[in-house]
Amino acid sequence: MLSLRRSLASATLAMSLAFVGTTAQATTGTPNNPVTVTDPELGEIIEGGTTQSVDPTRYDYVPDESQPIAASAWGHQAIGGYNISFKGLSLKIPAGTLAHDIQGGSTYIRREAAQYVLVASANICNYRIDFQNRDLRGRIVRTYTGNTVNKCARLVTVVRQIRKPFHVQPGVQCARLYAGGKFRGEQCHNIVK
């Protein structure tokens, strides 16, 4: 977490958040008081919040080793395999790749998409992809929570996208994979003004 904060501190000035075209525009959360709003097109949006690296089941979980990729519009991150328990059995879920694409410029995002692909024949269960903006200090500005698919799917490509334009604060914009109720990994882009 400290290395993430150091890399973010060297970026440019923070810009005030302006969320284009939704009813959520007037609602602002703070680091200590996150606010949840719902947008008809974007779903649940969590405004504000601090990060923690203890409980991977929460939206504000950020691993200590989380590092953004160099400023670019597309990137991918390997997500290591993990074990799940099912009816007393321990099952191994193989590794996969989380690809993340942002179209836009500066702090304006015209479209954001993420795709998770397993590298081997396997199931992924109870999965979702969130998009999260964190500011230059590593604080959560806004989380666009995806819908959880509460079933197991075999040989699935998990895809999520937002086609409605919005603004973010300088810092990072991340695609975050949750499966089995826990954070599994993320892919982040630097956002500079």
Image: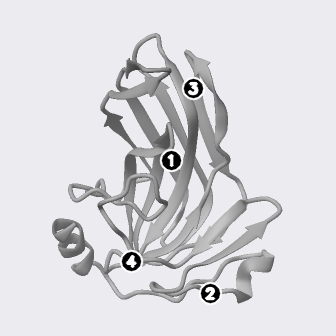
Residue type, numbered disc 2: Thr
> Left or right: 11 with respect to 180?
left
Closer to the camera: disc 4 or disc 1? Answer: 4
> Left or right: 62 with respect to 36?
left
Image point (78%, 75%), residue name: 21
Which residue position is annotated with label 4? 139
CB under 8 Å between discs 3 and 2: no
**Which tag, 3 or 1, sits closer to the chain's start?**
1
Q: CA distance from mark 3 to mark 1?
A: 15 Å
Which residue position is annotated with label 2? 28
- How many marks are shown on the rendered structure? 4
**Which tag, 4 or 2, sits closer to the chain's start?**
2
Residue 170 is situated, as x and y percent measured from the top left of the image, at 42, 76
Which residue position is annotated with label 3? 157
- Asked which colour scheme the image uses, the reply is one colour
Image point (34%, 60%), residue name: 62
Which residue position is annotated with label 1? 101
> Left or right: 87 with respect to 24?
left
Q: CA distance from mark 4 to mark 1?
A: 22 Å
Per the image, label 1 sits on a secondary structure element best described as: strand
